[in-house]
Amino acid sequence: MVTKCVLHKGLERAVATAQDGRCKNGLNAPPGVAPGEDHGLRADFSTSRLDNIAPMCSTERVVKLVALALFFLVAGLVHATEENVFRHPLGSQTEAAFRATSQNLSRHPFIRGNFEQERTLSRLNRSLRSSGNFIIAARQGMVWNTLSPFPSTLTMGGDFLIQSRPGGQRTVLSAQGNETFLRMADVISAVFSGDVQRLVDNFEIYYFGTAASWELGLVPMDSAINVFAQRIVMTGDTVIRSIQIMEQNGDTIKYILSNHSFPAELTSDEQEFFSTP
């Protein structure tokens, strides 16, 4: 029902925009209305009304109209997917699949791969993108090796944080006494290792799908975690494919993980990431 409504609104907006004459001046939202926001226009989807669009717009404009409709359709599907998982609290019908998912995630003590990160700043209406490689070591922590736009490496251990920059400069921060950091490190470890008990202890859990294709929604119950994450949505199969973190201030961070590999152990250079002075 949610998906249907979103798609209907997307198509309704496109047709209503044409009927309002905006195809003559570009397919823009009305002044003061953000793209994707309902501006209150309504359209009659009868054949006669749709036929009336043609005289008002050139073929090029009609093509743009269809493209706009498809944009709202796709955007609606993405939004619906992210929200729908929170309509499925973990229960008896999904617990077996959730535990199978957790078991799949716990099979690999070491994971390498590539990441793309997009951070959306709500106040500035701006997105920042970066990409690089990641390493996950279940008992040691994780490494985000950013290659673009600026090289840097962030290593997160159980009780420390290391920022490395080109030229060998390293900044080591101890997490001792920082409850938020310690809880965050513990949660990240639980997520990537598929530790069911730690997830259940710290989150309200929502789950949709099967062990072969799933979505997981996490709402923190711990105030120390809630400081930095209001909600977390993950998707995957036998591995985690995406992570989206919705922060309290309205910002979001999304990671797309790809090209996973599962070494038996880390190289000496990879082990060096986790060494502290």
Image (cartoon, helix red, strand yellow):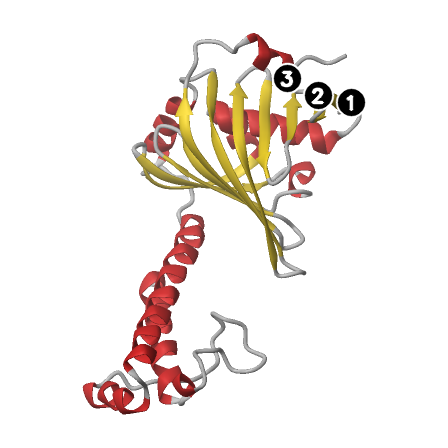
Which tag, 2 or 1, sits closer to the chain's start? 2
Q: Which marked residue is nearer to the observer: mark 3 or mark 2?
A: 3
Q: Which marked residue is nearer to the observer: mark 1 or mark 3?
A: 3
Q: Kindly indicate whether the residue at mark 2 contacts the one at mark 3 (C-beta within 8 angstroms).
A: no
Q: Residue 215: horizontal and vertical position, in percent?
A: 39, 41
Q: Quadrant of the N terminus?
A: bottom left
Q: Secondary structure at mark 1?
A: loop
- Determine which residue is flagged by label 3: 273
What residue appears at the point 43 percent right and 20 percent down from the top-left corner?
106
Give the amino acid type for the residue marked by disc 1 in the picture: Gln
Q: Kindly indicate whether the residue at mark 1 contacts the one at mark 2 (C-beta within 8 angstroms).
A: yes
Q: CA distance from mark 3 to mark 2?
A: 14 Å
Q: Quadrant of residue 212?
A: top left
What residue appears at the point 39 percent right and 77 percent down from the top-left corner?
13
Q: Kindly indicate whether the residue at mark 3 contacts the one at mark 1 (C-beta within 8 angstroms).
A: no
Q: Secondary structure at mark 2?
A: loop
Can residue 224 be spotted in the picture? Answer: yes
Q: CA distance from mark 1 to mark 3?
A: 19 Å
Considering only vertical position in the picture, is 226 above or below 194? below
- Determine which residue is flagged by label 1: 176
Q: Quadrant of the C terminus?
A: top right
Give the amino acid type for the residue marked by disc 2 in the picture: Asp
Q: Quadrant of residue 185?
A: top right
Which tag, 1 or 3, sits closer to the chain's start? 1
In the picture, measured across the screen, residue 10 lies left or right of residue 185, that is left
Give the amino acid type for the residue marked by disc 3 in the picture: Phe
Q: Residue 217: horizontal and vertical position, in percent?
A: 47, 43
Considering only vertical position in the picture, is 220 above or below 103? below
In the picture, measured across the screen, residue 223 lies left or right of residue 140, that is right
Q: Secondary structure at mark 3?
A: helix
